[in-house]
Image: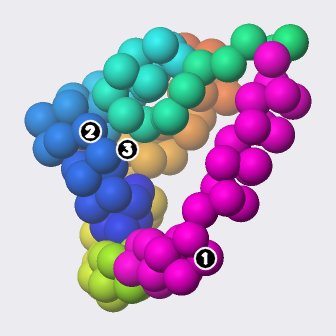
Amino acid sequence: LPPAVTARLYASIGRSRALRLLMTAELLDAERAERWGLISAVIDRTDLESSVDDLAQRIANEAPLSLAAFKTIDARLCAAAESIDATDIYRTVYGSRDFREGVTAFLQKRPPVFEGQ
């Protein structure tokens, strides 16, 4: 996971929850994702179009300069997190026997057997 994504996850749900998800590969249902702040709302399919229209209208009614400022700040925060170099980490993980074992086990629909190599 890129450091920028990890940093945003920490900021969104807190470090302990993020570490738990990242270390266990636990999946979240929509309700828990909403409670934790990863998504802003769980919407029934039948209400999706009207909910999107309502949200778009609410945003369109806000102060344009404030919206632009929020977007600029978000972009700058993301850019700062993206400057973290993790090439060495990716090389170690994705070049490992454990990574190949994980992919093979997934394709064979069996639990992986990791050896730390």
Report the side of 74 relative to 46 (left or right).
left
Q: What x and y, as percent, mark residue 67?
A: 54, 72
Sequence-first tag of 1 and 2: 2
Is the residue 79 above or below the residue 62 in the image?
A: below
Which of the two discs, 2 and 3, sits closer to the camera?
2
Q: Which one is in front, 36 or 19?
A: 36
- State the residue at coordinates (53%, 18%): 30
Is the residue 4 above or below the residue 19 in the image?
A: below
Q: Amino acid at mark 2?
A: Ile
- State the residue at coordinates (50%, 46%): 100
Query: Where on the picture, by quarter, is residue 104?
Result: top right
Residue 37 part of the magenta segment: no
> What residue sits right under mark 1 in the picture?
64
Q: Amino acid at mark 3?
A: Asp
Sequence-first tag of 2 and 3: 2
Q: Could you classify mark 2 by the number of other residues whose Cα lies within 10 Å: few (under 14), some (14-19), or many (20 or more)?
A: some
Q: Is residue 81 visible?
A: yes
- State the residue at coordinates (84%, 28%): 50
CA distance for labels 1 and 2: 28 Å
The secondary structure type at the circle numbered 1 is: helix
The secondary structure type at the circle numbered 2 is: helix
Farthest left residue in view: 16
> What residue sits right under mark 2 in the picture?
13
Report the side of 56 relative to 16 (left or right).
right
Main secondary structure found in the magenta portion: helix
Q: Amino acid at mark 1?
A: Pro
For the record, the magenta segment spans 47-74
Query: Where on the picture, by quarter, is residue 23?
Result: top left
CA distance for labels 3 and 1: 50 Å
